[in-house]
Image (spheres, helix red, strand yellow):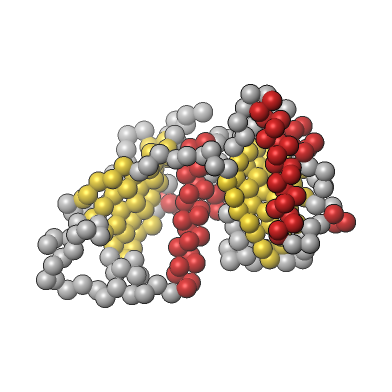
Amino acid sequence: MKKRYKRLTYILPNAIEVYEYLDGRYGARGSPRKKKEKPTKEQIRKRNQWNKERKARHKLRQWFRENDYLVTFTWRKADRPGNMKEAVKLWGKALRRIRAEYRKRGYELRYLRNVEVGTRGSWHIHMVVNRIPDADLILKKAWNHGGVNFKLLYEQGEFSELAAYITKTPDTDSRLAEASYHASQNLPVPEPEQKRLARWKKEPREKKGYYIDKESFHEGVNPVTGYKYRCYTMIRIHRRI
């Protein structure tokens, strides 16, 4: 049986993500095949982090725009929590206040956040949040443990760098001792389009109105399956606001 490949295509407002790899339903019966290797713990860890960043990136691309907020909540030294469980609990109390204020104004709160503690004991929270009128006042009033700093979202790579930033861990950032990532449940992402490929094309083709982000392009051989893979992102030239 001839090898066949599969293409998954995620269509998002300003980007299209493409993943191509061997379709597990097809093989090359009777032909030589590289022995499938058991993944190492390091490979599993990297794969899990890759999946977490990918899902966060899809949520960001689907639901957030450049004028939304990246917020950093800090703790005063005297008010720092004793552990991650306590930090998440304190954050939960502030979150309930924020969500209630959004609802009063007729809006739904959408967010991704990462609670982090540095190797020197400094605690902080990064939060991507949809910006509404008076959002800065709402967030500041809800947080009484320290400072609240605001930035408009950084959109380079159509939020790819932001996805890595909001999901970072001690494994990806040596300055961290511990981190806890979470996203609100109201950030659904469309299911990908699926297509089986009769052959492996040497180069991908850009869709009209898009360009391929070179930083996103990865192609090689999967060390576990022994088969080729390719993934890349096409970004819309004229962004939809």
Residue at 36% x, 53% y is 231
Compared with 166, 41 (above or below) is below
| Residue 149 horizontal/vertical position (percent) | 75, 42
| Residue 143 horizontal/vertical position (percent) | 78, 42
Compared with 61, 102 (above or below) is above
| Residue 124 horizontal/vertical position (percent) | 73, 53
| Residue 165 horizontal/vertical position (percent) | 59, 52
User: Horizontally, is 124 left or right of 162 in the view?
Assistant: right
Dividing the picture into quadrants, the one containing residue 228 is bottom left
User: Horizontally, is 93 left or right of 233 in the view?
Assistant: right
* Observer able to see residue 108: yes
* Observer able to see residue 61: no
Dividing the picture into quadrants, the one containing residue 21 is bottom left
Foreground of the two, 20 or 191? 191
Q: Residue furthest top?
A: 106
Compared with 105, 109 (above or below) is below
Residue at 26% x, 75% y is 35
Residue at 44% x, 69% y is 43
Q: How many labels does the image show?
A: 0
Q: In which quarter of the image is the N terminus?
A: bottom left
Foreground of the two, 76 or 198? 76
Residue at 88% x, 56% y is 78
Dividing the picture into quadrants, the one containing residue 69 is top right
